[in-house]
Amino acid sequence: QVQLVESGGGLVQAGGSLRLSCAASGRTFSPAAMGWFRQAPGKEREFVAAINRSGLRTYYSDSVKGRFTISRDNAEKTVYLQMNGLKPEDTAVYYCAADWDQGVSASSTTYNYWGQGIQVTVSS
């Protein structure tokens, strides 16, 4: 049974940093694609960042490019999201997503496995 468990969220002041982690379990090999999405109150879930298995291909939404960095540790089957220069508009529930068969993508439909979500709140 596949599980994705996020950690590292919390409350931070604007301009601060947080590092999210997401550990995958239930499969022998690391996922082909891993990504982060977020959903703010009253808004649709949106793409944040994604990374392929080798880590050589990464994608970012325009809103986080230059501030957030996605990385992964295949030995630990874990993906990270380093968030710097946080803004109040980054406040949302952040979801980890993974898939073992599909290539990396910014589309939520690519990912068949999702974490439970973790709250990130940025105060002004």
Image (cartoon, rainbow, N blue to C red):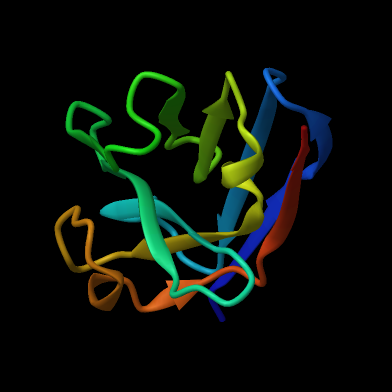
| In this view, 81 is above or below 47 | above
In this rendering, the answer to whether 60 lies above or below 69 is: below
Of 74 and 51, which appears nearest the observer? 51
Pick out the residue farthest to the front. Answer: 124
Left/right of residue 90 with respect to residue 122 in the rendered view: left
Residue lying furthest right? 11
Residue ID at (28%, 54%) = 33
Q: Quadrant of residue 5?
A: bottom right
Frontmost residue, 106 versus 25:
106
Point 58% across, 20% down: residue? 84
84 vs 112, nearest the viewer: 84
Q: Decide if residue 68 is on the left or right side of residue 57.
A: right
Residue found at x 27% / y 30%: 55
Question: Residue 46, position in %: x, y?
Answer: 39, 63
User: x%, y% of residue 39?
Assistant: 54, 66
The answer to whether 122 is drawn above or below residue 93 in the figure is above
Q: Locate the N terminus by quadrant.
A: bottom right
**Image quarter of the C terminus:** top right
